[in-house]
Image (tube, rainbow, N blue to C red):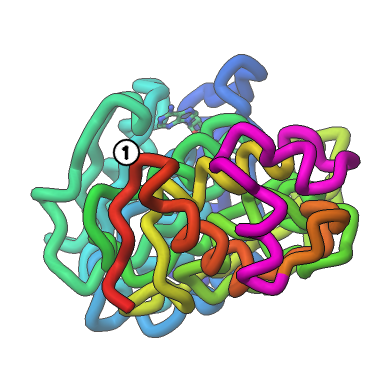
Amino acid sequence: MATIDGLPPLREVIAAHGLVARKQLGQNFLLDLNLTARIARAAGDLTAADVLEVGPGPGGLTRGLLAEGARHVLAVEKDARCLPALAEIAAAYPGRLEVVEGDALELDLTGRLTPPVRVVANLPYNVGTELLVRWLTPAVWPPFWESLTLMFQKEVAERIVARPGEDAYGRLAILAQWRCTARVVLMLPPQAFTPAPKVHSAVVHLTALPVPRFAADARVLQRVTAMAFGQRRKMLRASLRGLAPQIEAVLESVGIPPTARAEEIDIERFSALARAVAPAAGGQAPPA
Ligand code: SAM
């Protein structure tokens, strides 16, 4: 069967290299190269970008990225068994694919990437969420990446893009949407993967804004939302009691009813609250 790049179909690659999926590495592979090319297209224009791919496995998504014209792909994979299959892809795209063996949670590869950088990954869900939070909370903003295109369990994707008032709205939505645009670009049923996981999946595309939507100190905003959503069923005057003296008056001063609950409050008002409590919460008040 012809493939998008003339390389063998992924089933043959997996059989040839004995890549039996390992559960402990979260290995649920995408074998449909038309689907991986679609995910690559959802990442935006790759022709002038370096792509950081985390967890390439047998290389389905890697091949999609290269076929869609990625200038350079730096792929980090923990499972050494996948390296020979990835080397075959590198040979088919001379100078455009570099593979690093290692744990993405431990390696800092930013120095090996030339901006603009787009991050694309189909990762085990726990690793993906951990990396997402790290990528959203760098020491300086804008971050090293321009966009993130990441596969998640559907429920996690819903938490990233949720709006105020929705059940899924919480810390992750605020973290993501305070200084990114975030949208679900593709939904995938379990059968899209081999082996099929128990859950549905979704690809989320995040684009970094040059500056946050609303001024606030990142650490203070995170502290406020952690307290507010830590007890999300409580009224804010109760859940935020320890945040600042006379919290009811502070809430009212930024237009938040003290009897409101965290899930009703939008990012603009959480940012205003973070500014108002910044001196008491130990953060720096941003310029007015
Ligand atoms: N990208 C491939 C695809 O779409 O078919 C593989 C996806 S599979 C869900 C996840 C991949 O991430 C596996 O190849 C696994 O070995 C790798 N992986 C798991 N944990 C990792 C980590 N901490 N660092 C780098 N790679 C990891």
Does the magenta run of residues contain 249?
yes
x and y, in percent, of residue 109 in the image: 19, 43
Which residue is pictured at 24% across the width and 41% down the height?
Answer: 99
> SS at mark 1?
strand
Which residue is pictured at 77% across the width and 48% down the height?
Answer: 236
x and y, in percent, of residue 263 in the image: 81, 56
Report the number of discs. Answer: 1
Does the magenta run of residues contain 20?
no
User: As drawn, is 238 to the left or to the right of 177?
Assistant: right
Quarter of the image containing the C terminus?
bottom left
Q: Quadrant of residue 179?
A: bottom left
User: As drawn, is 223 to the left or to the right of 198?
Assistant: left
Which residue is pictured at 25% across the width and 51% down the height?
Answer: 74
Against 129, is 215 above or below?
A: below
Between residues 156 and 45, which one lies in front from this camera angle? 156
Say if residue 34 shows up in the picture: no
Tell me the amino acid under the disc marked 1. Val
User: As drawn, is 127 to the left or to the right of 65?
Assistant: right
Say if residue 237 shows up in the picture: yes
Ligand 1: does it lie within 8 Å of the C-beta at label 1? yes
Which residue is pictured at 36% across the width and 29% down the height?
Answer: 105
Q: Quadrant of residue 54?
A: top left
x and y, in percent, of residue 256 in the image: 73, 66
The magenta span reads 230-255
Between residues 26 and 110, which one lies in front from this camera angle? 110
The residue labelled by disc 1 is 76
Quarter of the image containing the N terminus?
bottom right
